[in-house]
Amino acid sequence: MNLLQGKTAIITGATRGIGKGIAEVFAQQGANVAFTYSSSVEAAKTLETELNSLGIKAKGYQSNAASYEQAQELAADVLETFGSIDVLVNNAGITKDNLLMRMSEEDFDKVIEVNLKSVFNMTKAVQRTMLKQRKGSIVNMSSVVGVKGNAGQANYAASKSGIIGFSKSVALELGSRNIRSNVVAPGFIETEMTGKLDEKVVEGWRNAIPLKRGGTPEDIANTCLFLASDLSAYITGQVLNVDGGMLT
């Protein structure tokens, strides 16, 4: 059974890591996929070809999620090309880590803009379509850091925590129209970004996790699949920690 058959999903920041994992799982489950990327043109073309080979319709869009205008344009393009917008996964995000005493205003603003304002931009952009359809599922990517904080990541934690408050508010506003808004908070997920870290450090992190391993992009993608599908039809305003028990 294909859980997303005939649905159209927008996934932001999908050319690598978690975003790519979500795009692949959604396509395998029958969803048509519109995905965004900021600069990786080659990776986007490769992903587009890979997804289309699964027999669904997929298209990559170079779009800056932090731009309100570009988000509006993107939603209009997707609606015209695909005919509906059933699922939005706000996954685009960056880090600019530093202790607060060394953090520049620019590094604070940039992280808030890309991670948090992008969620506002994209939700605003798809809202009208979902209201007309009287259905939709919005899945916003937070982090365990947004739930518990982390030294050296005040900007990132603020952005990811903000996503939780925003998502719960949207759930309250749009619930009567059958539009759901939920949050996924990944723990330590092993991607190409974490592959560059010192192996001893990574091993230490794994040992501190009750399930004794880092998560995979697929672990997050499967959770997003559940929240995007009708299996979670009565779930809204929730934060799902997908962290191997890290915050237990």
Image (tube, rainbow, N blue to C red):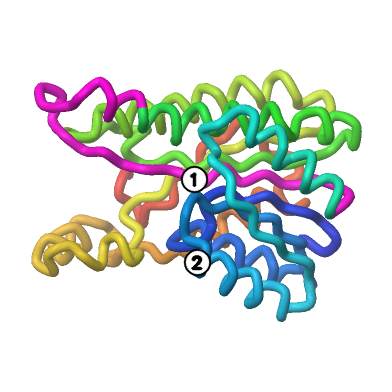
Task: Tell me, yes or no, whether the highlighted magenta stretch contains residue 44.
Answer: no
Q: Which residue is mark 2?
A: 218
The answer to whether residue 248 is left or right of residue 203 is right
The amino acid sitting under disc 1 is Ala
Q: Which residues are magenta?
A: 82-109
CA–CA distance between discs 2 and 1?
A: 17 Å
Q: Are marks 2 and 1 in contact (CB under 8 Å)?
A: no
Residue 83 in magenta stretch = yes
155 sits left or right of 6 in the view = left
Decide if residue 98 is on the left or right side of residue 71.
left
Q: In the rendered view, does 227 fall on the left or right side of 42?
A: right
> What numbered label is drawn on residue 92?
1
Q: Residue visible at 21% across and 65% down?
A: 196
Residue 155 location, x and y as percent?
29, 28
Mark 1 falls on what kind of element? loop
Observer-nearest of 67 and 240: 67
